[in-house]
Amino acid sequence: MNGMWATVIGSGIFHGVNPAMGWLFAAALGLQHGSRKAVLMALPPLALGHAVAVMLVTTSAVALGLFTRVDHLRTVMGALLIAWAAYHHFYGHKQRVRVGMTASFAGLALWSAGMAAMHGAGLMLLPALLPMCGAGLSVGSSLESAGTVTAVHTVVTLATAGAIALAAYQYLGLGLLRRAWINFDWLWCGALSVTGLLLIVT
C-alpha cells in the first residue's frame, strides 16, 4: 500500500511540475491580467479537467481488473504504457488543444482534460491500481477506490501546480522557462516506458 500511495503522490507532483498540465496557463493568465486572483481562478477548472481525464482511465482499469487475471492485466497495462509513450513521442506534439487566453471555466476544464488525455496522465496510475484488481472487491468498492486514487492524485497535482504558478507570477516570471528549460515530453515518455517495462517483467 505504501508503494501504491507513493505512485499516486509522485505522479501528482510530476504532473503538477509539468507546465503542459496547466501551471503555465494559470501563470500566464495572471501576468496578462496583472492579478493573483486570475492565477487562483484558473486552477479549479484545470484541476477538474485533469481529474475527469484521469478518472476515465482509473475506473476503466479497475473495471477491467474485475474480469481479468492480474498477471494478464499487468502485461496489458505494461504494453499500453509503452505504446502510449511511443505514440506521444512521435505524434503527441502534433495534437494540440487550442484555447485562447480569455478562456472561460468550461474552456479551461476542457483544455486541461484534453491535455491530460493526450499525455496519458491517467496511465501512470495503473501500477497503483493493481492491488485493487483481483482482490475480491465489489464493483462499488473498486470504483470508490479508483475515485479515491484520482482525488488524492488531483489534489497533489493542484497543490504543486498552484505553488509553481504563484511563484512564477509573483517572483520568477515566465522567463524561467527560457533560463531553466526541461523537456518534460522526453521525461514523460521515458517514465511511461520504464513503468510499462517494470509492469511486464515483474
Image: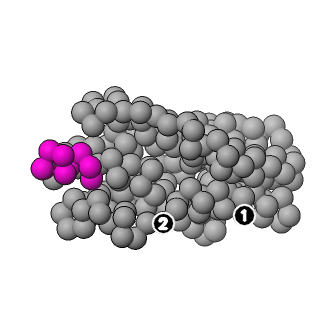
Image quadrant containing the C terminus: bottom right
Residue 168 in view of the camera: no
Q: Nearer the viewer, residue 76 or 178?
A: 178
Q: Is residue 52 above or below residue 1?
A: above
Under mark 1, the amino acid is Val
Circle 2: residue type: Ile
Q: Is residue 72 left or right of residue 142?
A: right
In the rendered structure, the answer to whether residue 48 lies left or right of residue 68 reads left
Residue under numbered circle 1: 194
Q: Which residues are magenta?
A: 27-35
Q: Where's the N terminus, which quadrant?
A: bottom right
Q: Is residue 166 visible?
A: yes
- Say which element carries label 1: helix
Front position in the image: 108 or 52: 108
In this orientation, which residue lies closer to the viewer: 88 or 142?
Answer: 88
Q: What residue sits 50% from the left and 37% below the top?
A: 96
Residue 174: quarter of image: bottom left
Left or right: 14 with respect to 174? right
* Residue 196 location (% of width, % of height): 75, 57
Which residue in the structure is indicated by mark 2? 182
Comes first in the chain, label 1 or label 2: 2
Left or right of 50? Residue 36 is: left
| x, y percent for residue 32 | 18, 46
| Location of residue 169 in the rendering, given as x and y in whole percent from the top left corner | 22, 59
Front disc: 1 or 2:
2
State yes or no: residue 34 in magenta.
yes
Furthest residue toward front:
178
| Residue sitting at x 60%, y 60% | 186
